[in-house]
Amino acid sequence: MSLAKAQNTRMKLPRAIFAIVPLAILLLPLGIYFADRATSGDEVARNVTVAGVSVGGMSRADATLAVEAHENRLRTSTGVFTLNGQTFKLSPLTITLQADVRTAIDAAFAARRDAGVLANLRSWLSSFSTPHEVPLALSFDADAIAHEIESWEREAIPNPAFNGGVAVIDGVIVPQYPRPGHSLDHAAARRLVVAEMSTLDKSGVTFEVLESTPILTAADIDVALQEMTRMVMASITLISTDVGFRVVFQPEHLVSAVRAELSADDTQLLTSFDPGRVLEILEPRRAEYEIAPVDAKFDIDIATDDFTIVPGRDGTLLDIDALVEEMKQASLGSGFGSFPLLVGSEPSFTTEDATAFTTLGPLAGFTTEHPGHEARVANIQTMADDVNGAIVLSGDEWSLNAYIGERTQAKGYIAAPVLIDGMPYCCDHPSNIGGGVSQFSTTLFNAVFFSCLEDVVHQPHSLYLSRYPMGREATLGLPNPDMRFKNNTDHPLVIATAYTETSITVKIYGDNGGLTCTDDTHEMEDVIEFGEELVADEEGELDPGQREKIRSGIDGFFVKVDRIVTYPDGSTEIDLRLTHRYRPLSEQYLVHPCEVTGEPVDCPVKLGSLLGITWEQALSRLEGVGLRAQKEPGFVDSPSQHNIVLTQSIAPGDWVQPGTVIRLTVGDYSS
């Protein structure tokens, strides 16, 4: 290399170094920044405080504990307030001090985390010199503060100013005239209390007592008194023609509700009726004027399949503000007025909805028979009346239990026999109220079955009852078993019911696209014949050897039922395969307790007559039936009576336990 080139190279190296060093110095803070950010992503940024509590560099859990500790210190920091020379202490717990710690911690974590690298870098650099304060929102019970201030005012101000009013005391309207005096500015006092209780550095607060002159005059009180007196002098009558509701407010009702209140600006005394008291007076009759919406219905004649639309009706709500104003106008006027109501919710199925459905026709119906004049029949007919006209919209699932609700005596249901755990039972169980309605559920299920509707839930009885179709029936309980199906058609369905003294019929109307359904009920399988069960006669009405049938037996078996759907084009398929196993039920006989095991055990013996036979014959008879004999001599005058039984201690025909000793008097002839 030439000398000139070497010198030139040595001159370029210092220049390159001088260019790189400033760049390195500039990039150094960026490296520190990125390293700092990478290691503190789960911590509050540097130099951040919440209500003066340093949380910078803390995890969320530690920061939360630190701020909660500050909240706890605030809750134990008592405030001291002075009014008219008297001192009052206030605990933060009395006014329910609470801090929104979570929101403050969220804000602390968001601090100095700006959008963009440059903004974040600026925030990071400022964190070394400038603190970032996050406020801690505190809340208090405003009513509790107002109560405390009012109690301090009553205790510390002997001559409080009174703006006047009219009160009702023991049913008498009493004027209360205004008077000047001293008072406290309650709004300003509330602000001072909140400010003092929000800090740990409490210095005490002294309230200013103000000279106060009432705005109202005695004349204002007299005007209100006269108007209130007129408002309660006579009864008033309000009428709603919309729902046919009429109510009469007697003077004693009116005087309990009338009131006089200051206007918002405290410049007037306004008379009215108290809405809360008026609602109390009307509460017993609420159901008469606040009416739930009523769905439109279809009134269907099952015999002819003709139907008419019963219009629906919107619900009504009481307009309480308009009502108390109407009461005032009526009381100061003619004594009559309207009872104002608001339009409530509209029915879920409106009259317009009903008129839009023109394709309703009979799908299928089903009838089951029952004996007449039984308690269960009343329940079946009550449920039929409740369900009649029920509408199931397209795609909806319909539950019989949800539609009917609890079966209660108030709804017209009575006690009747039911099956509980597979056994007939009557009638002091809660399930007995409404007993027998499984027959309605079964009848409805079959109408659903043959209407080609989707079966969602049903449960056959545990025992086979001959009045129901084998394998195609549905028991009902509350809350379960239930009978539910889905309207899988494109049109609404209507359930119609009818009954006679000995039958119940359910028919479903709609449009299933021309489908028809039939059943294929298979033969019984795996039949289990019922056995015999003996029940002890605890009443003592049966003698050994006698029995009384108290329950017929039922065989158990397994059965299959298929539903066959026929489509408009004539094709068929099986779309529902039902299977069920019925339990057997033993046949019951009432027997003497000694025979309840099937084999007589220590049964009592019916004692026959032993008179007139020899002692040996009597002894043999008694020993033959498990009895014992005791011989007692009885002197006789004739040899023909010698060794003959003359008397027995237990009369013939009586029942005696085995081992009983029978005392016999036996003739003893001596020459």
Image (spheres, grey):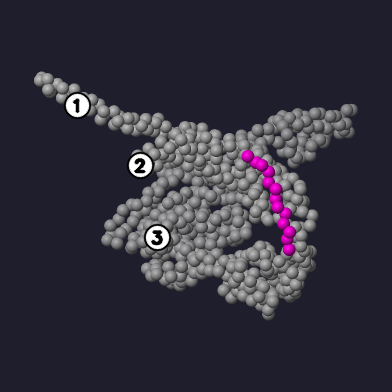
Q: Residue furthest left?
A: 2
Q: Which residue is drawn at 45% across and 50% down?
A: 457
SS at mark 3 in the image: loop
Residue to which mark 2 is pinned: 116
Q: Which of marks 3 and 1 is in front?
A: 1
Q: Which of marks 3 and 2 is in front?
A: 2
Residue to which mark 3 is pinned: 394
Q: Earlier in the sequence, mark 3 or mark 1?
A: 1
Q: Residue at x 35, y 42 (%)?
A: 116
Start-end of magenta stretch: 201-213
Q: Is residue 375 among the parts visible in the rendering? A: no
| Gap between marks 3 and 1 measured at Cα | 89 Å
SS at mark 1 in the image: helix
| Gap between marks 3 and 2 measured at Cα | 55 Å
SS at mark 2 in the image: loop
- The quarter holding residue 532 reads top right
Q: Where is residue 556 in the image (x, y as percent from the top left)?
A: 48, 44
Q: Residue 564, relative to residue 237: is it above or below?
A: above
Q: Residue furthest bottom?
A: 334
Q: Which amino acid type corresponds to the residue marked 3 in the rendered image?
A: Ser
Residue to which mark 1 is pinned: 12
Q: Which of 217 and 551 is in front in this view?
A: 217
For residue 209: magenta?
A: yes
Q: Earlier in the sequence, mark 2 or mark 1?
A: 1
The crowd level at tag 1 (other Cα within 10 Å; few <14, some 14-19, many 20+) is: few
Q: Residue at x 74, y 41 (%)?
A: 653
| Gap between marks 2 and 1 measured at Cα | 38 Å
Q: Residue 378, relative to residue 582: is it above or below?
A: below
Q: Residue 93, relative to residue 157: is it above or below?
A: above
